[in-house]
Every structure is written in structure tokens, then in C-alpha cells.
Amino acid sequence: MRCLPCHKKDPAMHTALLFWNNIISACGVPEIIISDRDPKFTYEFWNNLYDMLGTKLAFSTAYHPQTDGLAQRINQTMEDILRRFCAYGMEYKDHEG
């Protein structure tokens, strides 16, 4: 799992570029991406990108607690980590350098 800083108002193209530059370049093309139906992952640009890459886009079904719950647990875990990180004034150290 990788997390990137972004803002909910970032345009889809910016999000796509973050994804391309930080995920695909570091990890390769994912076989499947599970989306919680965030509008950024439903734009035409993303559909074209997925087609070009040969990636399958799988949406969670509406009100499907197993899939939605997984995304929410990941989000909650990241929120907890970031909250502790900020609360204790930890310094970020790049794991590669």
C-alpha cells in the first residue's frame, strides 16, 4: 500500500499524474484497483488510462460492507498513523536515503 498527499479538490488529471509518477513508476502496473467510487477514479481520463494499461477497474458495490469496510479500515489506519506522527512531532526519514 502506498499513500500520497493530495487534496480532495485536486483535479482528476493531477491525481492521475500522482498515480503514474509514484505508483506505476515505483511498483509497476497493478492488475486490479478497487475503488470506493471516488469521482476521481470514475472520470473518463481514468477509464482511458486503465484501458491503455490493461488494468481492470473494479468498483465496490453500493452498500457492500466487506469491500467498503476494507477501504474504510485502510483509511482509518492511515489517519491514526498520521495523527500520531503529527502529535509526537516525529521527523520523516526517507526509507531510501
Image (spheres, grey):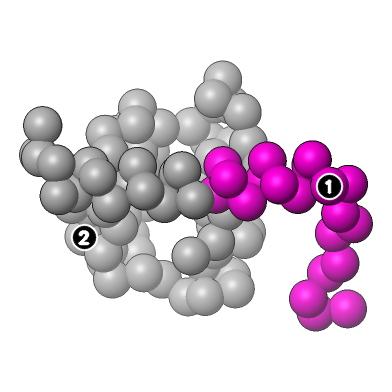
Q: Quadrant of residue 29?
A: bottom left
| Image quadrant where one finds the C terminus | bottom right
Tell which of 96 and 69 is nearer to you: 69
Q: Position of residue 81 (x, y in %)?
A: 63, 51
Highlighted magenta segment, given as a residue range = 78-97
At a point 26% along the width and 34% down the height, the residue shown is: 37
Q: Are marks 2 and 1 in contact (CB under 8 Å)?
A: no
Left or right of residue 70, residue 30 in this image: right
Specify which label sits upstream in the sequence, 2 or 1: 2
Q: Residue at horizontal 58%, vertical 45%?
A: 80
Up the image or down, 62 lies above or below 71; here it is above
Q: Is residue 67 left or right of residue 7?
A: left
Residue 93 visible in this rendered orientation of the protein: yes
How many numbered circles does the render carry? 2
Q: Which residue is mark 1?
A: 88
Residue beneath disc 2: 56
Real-space Cα separation, disc 2 to disc 1, in angstroms: 40 Å
| Residue at position x 36%, y 69% in the image | 30
Image quarter of residue 31:
bottom left
Q: Residue at x 76, y 49 (%)?
A: 85
Residue type for callout 2: Lys
In the rendered view, tell whether residue 53 sits above or below residue 11.
below
Q: Position of residue 4 (x, y in %)?
A: 62, 49
